[in-house]
Image: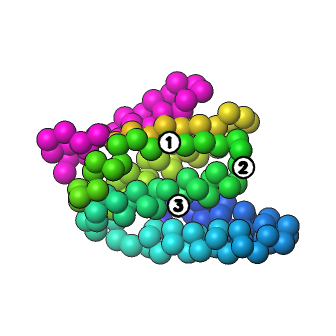
Amino acid sequence: MNRDYFQSLLSGLNLAYDYTLMEDNELTLDILNNVIKLTRYFCKDKEDMIMLVQELEHIEIFLHLQKLRFQKEFKYEIEGKYELNSLFIKRFCLIEPIMRFFFNHIEVQPERREIKINLKHEKNELELRIEDIYSNLLKKFSYYI
């Protein structure tokens, strides 16, 4: 398990602990359930081919946990996901760069955290664009499928 996965799981567990102290049992259970889903996903073989919709589901879980963690200080948007549901990709090819981008660029900002994720498929290529809305930082990744 790489450092970003581990960091994600620890921050999720820490978040659950905080909500437990606030006695918000429903939200604590939601957080723990999502951390369990991510842990199971991260323990799978990296070479597995999966449907894009499965990877997107876990990206949404990761981003949802970050939204809870930073409360109203974090926003995200994913464009193009509905057109691509039937594609098969290698597991982690999208979530890894998104997590890395989050931990390296979004998490360290004291305020105004917002990212925009865009997926685009042309011919045999899947393009992932991740943009930090406030700093105009843009990262592009291309995958041949």
Label ID, residue 31: none
Does 78 sit left or right of 90 as displayed?
Answer: right
Q: Quick one: label 2, few (<14), some, or many (20+) residues within 10 Å?
A: few
Q: Residue at x 64, y 51 (%)?
A: 67
The numbered mark, 3 or 2, whose residue comes first in the sequence reads 3
The numbered mark, 3 or 1, whose residue comes first in the sequence reads 3
What kind of element bears circle 1? strand
The numbered mark, 1 or 2, whose residue comes first in the sequence reads 2
Residue 106 percent across, percent down from the top left? 61, 39
Q: Which residues are magenta?
A: 120-145
The kind of residue tagged 3 is Ile
Alpha-carbon span between mark 3 and mark 1 = 13 Å
Does 119 sit left or right of 1 as displayed?
Answer: left
Does 114 sit left or right of 121 as displayed?
Answer: right
Does 92 sit left or right of 11 as displayed?
Answer: left
The kind of residue tagged 2 is Gln
Instruction: Report if the CB atoms under discs 1 and 2 are less than 8 Å apart.
Output: no
Residue 112 percent across, percent down from the top left? 68, 33
Q: Residue at x 48, y 33 (%)?
A: 131
Q: Which residue is mark 1?
A: 77
Q: Which residue is mark 2?
A: 71
